[in-house]
Amino acid sequence: MQPKIKSKVRCTDQEIGEIIRVIVDPLSQDISHLVVKTGGRELLIPTDQNVAACTESGVDLAFSSEALARFDLFRREDYVQVKEVEIAHLDRHLDVMPGEALVPIPDLEKNIERRTFLQRFTNAIGLVLALPLLYPVIRYIIHPMYRPFDNTWIKIGGADQLRELDKPRLIKFQKTVKEGFLEREYEKSQWAVKASPGLLEKIYKNREVEFRDPDGKIVWRNNKATDVVIFSGKCPHLGCAYRLRKHRRFGQSFVCPCHLSVFDMSGAVLDGPAPRPLDILPMKMSRSGEIEIIDVEFKAGKKERIRIV
Ligand code: FES
């Protein structure tokens, strides 16, 4: 059995307080320390050899309260919440919620000032040496940034594949991109959902979603007259691909494995670091029932939608 938050903690002679945090070893994924609040202090107690028993009624420590003086005080600045770092399958090992568990910040990360200085110094020297060689390459690379956005409509498949209401499906399609004189084709995927009136209401909230060119000109408007909605397949936090999962707290949701952002079927953020809801793409239906989209992309990590493609 694992220690739980708020469990009572007893030494061999008396009850001393309760658990307020647990520290997780990122390698073994086990609980390595308990943070125990006792007598107005927060102590860091390693679980190894100090925990005699862990039951529903609390945690029994293997020493008397006099020995508490040998444990370090807990320093919050040395740790980061488990949900802020990516540790695969950690929730299989833990009974506590990710927000209640911490992992240590590596020593290398703590010594950030010296490391940042050396890094910047090395980068600056490298840049000065490489500038004459890099200039033509940079010019070539940034040239496409000044091109207007590509507002081509792309057919991504028939709406008949969305048979069930409010059940999203990942739709894959081929996109052709022009790079200089070359044309390249690659596979992309976006989430599509045939939305019930209730879900449409939640998505559009009685307003239209507008898409604009850099000069502010409106390119397209989505509204609830069309019951198919396309969500960009990229998480608005840092652009990872998210998935449809049964979340133990929120039920059927979109879950991003990178930093555990969770979104409901309307794209609204339920949990995690995502700064905005899932991005909706401009879409329309052809007469033959084919879904067409403009494959726009927005800047990741921003609260506002800033179009970049
Ligand atoms: S990329 Fe960070 S939560 Fe999705």
Image (cartoon, rainbow, N blue to C red):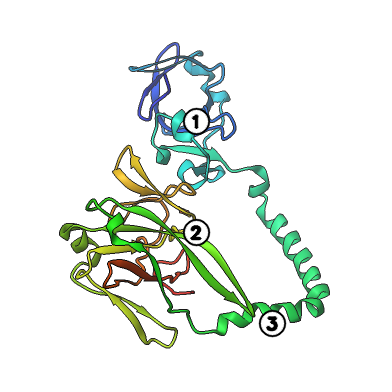
Location of residue 291 in the rendering, given as x and y in whole percent from the top left corner: 33, 67
Q: Is residue 187 above or below residue 299?
A: above
Which residue was labeled with disc 1? 43
Q: Earlier in the sequence, mark 3 or mark 1?
A: 1
Could you say which disc has been placed on residue 238 in the image?
A: 2
From the viewer's side, name the closer residue of 69 and 142. 142
Decide if residue 127 is in sight here. yes
Mark 2 close to ligand 1, CB under 8 Å: yes
Which residue occupies the extreme front position in the image? Answer: 288
Give the CA separation, mark 2 to mark 1.
36 Å
Packing grade of label 3 (10 A; few <14, some 14-19, many >=20) is few
User: Which residue shows up at 23% across the image and 68% down it?
Assistant: 226
> Which amino acid type is marked by label 3?
Arg
| Secondary element type, mark 3 | helix
Residue 204 lies left or right of residue 278; in this view the side is left
Mark 1 close to ligand 1, CB under 8 Å: no
Give the CA separation, mark 3 to mark 1.
57 Å
Q: Quadrant of residue 1?
A: top left
> Which amino acid type is marked by label 1?
Leu
Residue 207 lies left or right of residue 89; in this view the side is left
| Secondary element type, mark 1 | strand
Which residue was labeled with disc 3? 139
User: Which residue shows up at 50% across the image and 33% down it?
Assistant: 23
Q: Which callout, 2 or 1, points to the residue nearer the camera?
A: 2
Could you say which disc has been placed on residue 258 in the image?
A: none
